[in-house]
Image (cartoon, rainbow, N blue to C red):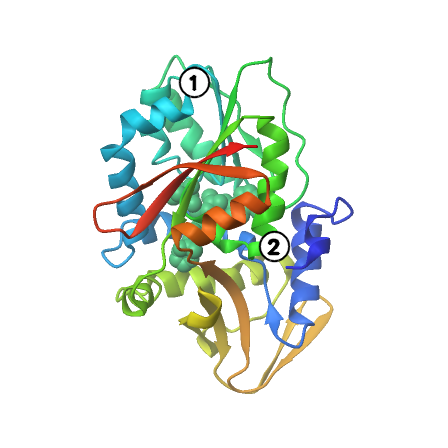
Amino acid sequence: MGRDHRSRSRPAGLAGFRQDVVAGLSLPQKTLPPKHFYDAAGSRLFERICRLPEYYLTRAELALTRAHLPAIARFAGTGGILLEYGSGESLKTRLLLRAMRPSVYMPVDISQDALRLAGAKLAREFPELRIAPVAGDFSRPLDLPRLAGRDRLVYFPGSTIGNLTPQEAQAFLRMTRGQVGPRGAMLVGVDLKKDANVLHAAYNDARGVTAAFNLNLLKRINRELGGDFDLRRFSHYAFYNAPLGRIEMHLVSLGAQTVNVGDHRFGFAAGESIHTENSYKYSIAEFQALAAQAGFRGARVWTDRRGLFSLHGLIAD
Ligand code: SAH
Ligand code: AVI
């Protein structure tokens, strides 16, 4: 994803998906943006990943949020607007909703299905809560509904920020800095650097759910863009790239082949890959330095007992 990824001129929806796929598959290292994983099936597969024994991220973030909830709620404040990016099934959010009692909860997600399902469940569980969902892409400038004057807290859990390059993460943080205003607060969940074997297992689970999540992107291209990817001829590959501090996910072509997407043809050599996702891992100091470059001061940081995951409380300088 380059700088133009954030520009207003790129179309959204199906046209944007087509443009990203054709551009990405035309690069020397074929690449697809991870935001396109999340159709209805992709969102369901991600929810299954969160419950896998190897995928420690969700459990660690839930545990640290439970353990430090009073301090997190004091940092976040009560009664304001809770704006969450990449809300998905709004799992950890329930803890914050109970502790913060916001006036409005504004979940923002690219997946309409995830937003609809999570919204319906939350409305049953929190009948008093005003929910204002926004279906949108946070990698481009977003017009959010203007809600009268209360304080805003931006919540970005799950280490979804790790799916952006450090440059994109900084651009995202600068955008949110404008949304929270001076001295505004943000809570960001960030996966920590750790033993490469633990990372490897989390992205190569024994049941093959992560592989199905990765391959679902090709299914989505076939269904929505008239592609003819043969899923049996691509395989999931994920590894920790230590020098760059990131897990990389790829789909590797199992032989020489040609694939059509609508009117476009793409040749694959045997062993050639499509790079589908990065998942950056940061030390606490690395993430605080990144946030500082975007104008945020790292005011608080909470971790789980095992030191797997971090939640940063940032304040706009
Ligand atoms: N916050 C949840 C879900 C994380 S999965 C958790 O912590 O478990 C990442 C979520 O971000 C998905 O629901 C996906 O649909 C959403 N997402 C990914 N890229 C996005 C983008 N560019 N704009 C908006 N939402 C995005
Ligand atoms: C959403 N995001 C933080 C997940 C991650 O761990 O990078 C997506 C994911 N990819 C493979 N497994 C989970």
In depth, the one of 172 and 285 nearer the eye is 285
**Which of the two discs, 2 and 1, sits closer to the camera?**
2
For label 2, the SS is helix
So how many labels did they put on this image?
A: 2
Note whether ligand 1 is within 8 Å of mark 2: no
Q: Quadrant of residue 26?
A: bottom right
User: Residue 144 placed where, x, y %?
Assistant: 63, 28
In depth, the one of 225 and 307 nearer the eye is 307
Q: Which residue is mark 1?
A: 102
Side of 194 where 39 appears, left or right: right
User: Residue 244 placed where, x, y %?
Assistant: 49, 68
User: Residue 28 placed where, x, y %?
Assistant: 66, 77
Vertical order, 95 against 79 (above or below): below
Which amino acid lies under the numbered mark 1 shown in the image of this protein?
Answer: Pro
Asked whether the viewer can see residue 227, the reply is: yes
In the rendered image, the quadrant that contains the C terminus is top right
Which amino acid lies under the numbered mark 2 shown in the image of this protein?
Answer: Gln
User: Residue 120 placed where, x, y %?
Assistant: 41, 27
Q: Which residue is mark 2?
A: 167
In the rendered image, the quadrant that contains the N terminus is bottom right
10 Å crowding of disc 1: few (<14), some (14-19), many (20+): many
In depth, the one of 202 and 111 nearer the eye is 202
Q: Quadrant of residue 235?
A: bottom left
Side of 295 where 50 appears, left or right: left
10 Å crowding of disc 2: few (<14), some (14-19), many (20+): few
Q: Earlier in the sequence, mark 2 or mark 1?
A: 1
